[in-house]
Amino acid sequence: MKVIATYNIKGGVGKTATAVNLAWLAAREGAPTLIWDLDPQGAASYYFRIRPTIKGGGKRLVQGKRDLDDFIRGTDYELLDLLPADFSYRKMDLYLERSKNPISQLRKLLKPFRNEYYYVFLDCPPSISLVSENIFEATDAVLVPTIPTTLSLRTYKQIRSFFRKHGLDADKILAFFSMVDRRKTMHRSIVDTPPEYMKNLLQTAIPYDSKVEQMGIERTPLAEFAPNSRTAHCYEALWNDIKKRIPNMR
């Protein structure tokens, strides 16, 4: 089982769209796939037309009083399941602090699925927190969508700095440029000549595209309603890039 997070400290950079589209592509290839919506806003759950609520809330999950399997829901797509968000996830840090081995709790919760799913995608909230540390410990790769602007690059550097300070494996970080608008001079400049400190940068960039925003109207992955769009093809190329970077991928 490969666990892949879409993560950034910043919001609005394309984390959820990436998680939803890549999970759909993985399932289309025939790999049993789970997407866990860890963001209390519940955007991934909304895209898949699943109510973002967990009976008893996140506290019972973290405490091990309820199995994750009790809350997993099938989506409209074969081999693709979803563990919906819950608004109580906003207090997830507090629940983790009160548990044994608070940094390893997420990995422990996912362990029973190692023979059930080939891929688990984590759609993460935009923060640095104990939840983030759990995510970093549990994952095989941390995908960091990065808008080609000065502030987004600064955020990327903060993530790498956090990994170094906490002795985490920074090779897990796989950044890629997202929401790229080549009409903008800064976007073109950064994408064409990325900073040297952007290690493990994926080659595929995701363009700015109103069709990605339209996912919120269609409530379905991009390749379902716009399969011939440039951005749908870019997500496919990005997924192929990722599979080449993570050991023992399909």
Image (cartoon, grey):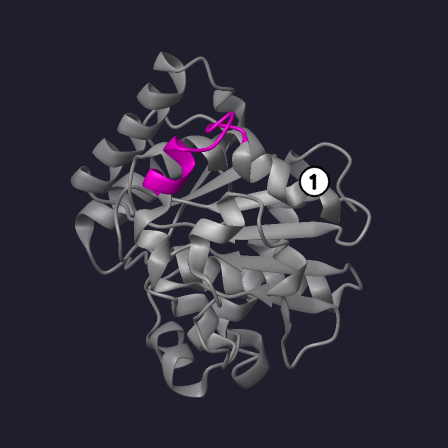
Toward the viewer: 42 or 190? 42
- Residue drawn at x 39%, y 15% is 166
Toward the viewer: 142 or 210? 142
> In terms of secondary structure, where does tag 1 sit?
helix
Query: Where does the image place residue 178, in percent across and percent down from the top left?
Result: 37, 53
Q: Visible in this render: residue 239?
A: yes
- Residue drawn at x 76%, y 44% is 114
- Residue drawn at x 44%, y 54% is 58
The stretch in magenta equals: 93-104
**In the rendered structure, which amino acid carries the disc numbered 1?**
Lys
Asked which quadrant contains residue 87, the reply is bottom left
Query: Where does the image place residue 214, in percent across and percent down from the top left?
Result: 37, 81
Toward the viewer: 81 or 148? 81
Query: Where does the image place residue 125, in percent across and percent down from the top left?
Result: 35, 50
Q: Which residue is mark 1?
A: 111
Q: Find out whether residue 60 is within the magenta segment.
A: no
In the image, 219: left or right of 178?
A: right
Q: Callout 1: 10 Å neighbours few (<14), some, many (20+)?
A: few
Query: Where does the image place residue 163, in percent across and percent down from the top left?
Result: 40, 21
In the image, 235: left or right of 89?
A: right
Task: Please determine whether, in this image, residue 236 is positioned above or below residue 156.
Answer: below
Q: Visible in this render: residue 205?
A: no
Q: Find out whether residue 99 is within the magenta segment.
A: yes
Asked which quadrant contains residue 46, the reply is bottom left
- Residue drawn at x 57%, y 49% is 65
Task: Please determine whether, in this image, residue 223 is positioned above or below residue 244.
Answer: below
